Image (cartoon, helix red, strand yellow):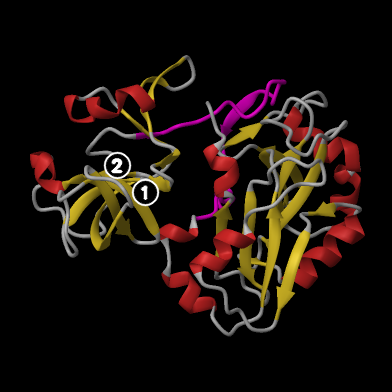
Amino acid sequence: MRSLVTIQKVKAVSPIPDSDFIELAHIMGWQCVVKKGEFKEGDLGVFYEVDSFLPLDERYEFIRASSYRESAYNGIGFRIRTMRMRGQISQGLFLPLEQFPELAGCAEGGDVTEKLNVKKWYIPETASSGGTIIGNHPYGIPPSDEIRIQSALELLDQLKGKPFYITTKMDGTSGIVYYIDGKIGCCSRNKEIKDEETALYWMPVYKHGLKEKLAKLGKNIVLTGEICGPGIQRNRLRLEDTEWYVFDVKDQDAGLYLSYDDAVALCSELGLQTVPLEERGDTFDYDLAALLEKAKGKYPSGLDKEGIVVRNTIAPKAISFKVLNNDALLKEKD
């Protein structure tokens, strides 16, 4: 489960030009607009990440005008998203810890998502039929989700000076294909899907003949990729047909992800596309500001791309994070 709400310390407070009422609080790699004078460096507060969905509560009423949502999919509450205020990007919500007596005793870094009854805001991933859910992921098959770099700045130091590669984050829905002990199966991000040729999450298998190819390969592997195309998310790629772009290959017996080169080679053998490679190098030396700039840009369609994913090149995959395109986030309306 993603830690949507945590106790965090203010790293710095900076002014917003021509504003008498608000300023910026810097938390981890994020910045949030807060009331002027509400925080000083070193203060602890409650930090709600982007995509948090807050319950109705008097303490959140001040954000009703910008954040209140009624959704058949999510319910009623307040959605936290990337916004621009007085020319400054604000990503998240940061409130004084003393407003939450129920969090007494919680230390810096503590996950309080469940204590505050906060959920993740979900946009239904596809307008077409994903398929029939038959259960959760089989044991040992991980969900696909990358951490945002602003929540894990220590990864920049861990990757510094090491071989790396950067791929485009595709606009779609995560689709998993596994072959384990002679059985092939497909999953969405969190659920296993029944074998039906019309099911979206089984598209990679039937389109690419993976039942035969994986049986011939005879290896216990898990392939994870992004299913993109018409009716899926916003189809920013403007694809005319559904496609699957692989970004992870896991050797299930070894419990390890393949190196970049080995994963690309295996996908080529299976006739599968991988996510587009944007950059590869021997010595990682990006800071947060440079990565945020790198994450901007367009798909070949001319529409804003979602961002990038950065990883170490050599197996096993130990360092991996996403950097989202703020230009695209600011345009979100849902």
Q: Position of residue 333 (x, y in %)?
A: 53, 27
Q: Secondary structure at mark 1?
A: loop
Left or right: 92 as drawn, with respect to 298: left
- Residue type beneath disc 1: Ser
Residue at left offset 22%, top offset 42%: 21
* Residue situated in front as seen by the camera: 212 or 105: 105
Q: Which mark is residue 3?
A: 1
Tell me how far mark 1 sits from mark 2, CA to CA.
6 Å
Crowd band around label 1 with a 10 angstrom C-alpha radius: few (<14), some (14–19), many (20+): some
Residue at left offset 86%, top offset 43%: 211
Q: Is residue 59 magenta?
A: no
Residue at left offset 53%, top offset 39%: 330
Crowd band around label 2 with a 10 angstrom C-alpha radius: few (<14), some (14–19), many (20+): many
Name above or below for residue 261 compared with residue 229: below
Name above or below for residue 133 compared with residue 158: above
Q: Is residue 131 magenta?
A: yes
Q: Position of residue 47 (x, y in %)?
A: 28, 48
Residue 316 visible, this orientation: yes
Q: Secondary structure at mark 2?
A: loop
Precedes in sequence: disc 1 or disc 2: 1
Residue at left offset 72%, top offset 21%: 128
Residue 249 visible, this orientation: no
Left or right: 58 as drawn, with respect to 291: left
User: Which residues are the magenta region?
Assistant: 119-147
| Residue picked out by circle 2 | 113
In the figure, residue 196 lies in which quadrant? top right
Q: Position of residue 332 (x, y in %)?
A: 55, 33
The secondary structure that most of the magenta stretch takes on is loop
- Residue type beneath disc 2: Thr
Mark 1 and mark 2 residues within 8 Å of each other at the beta carbon? yes
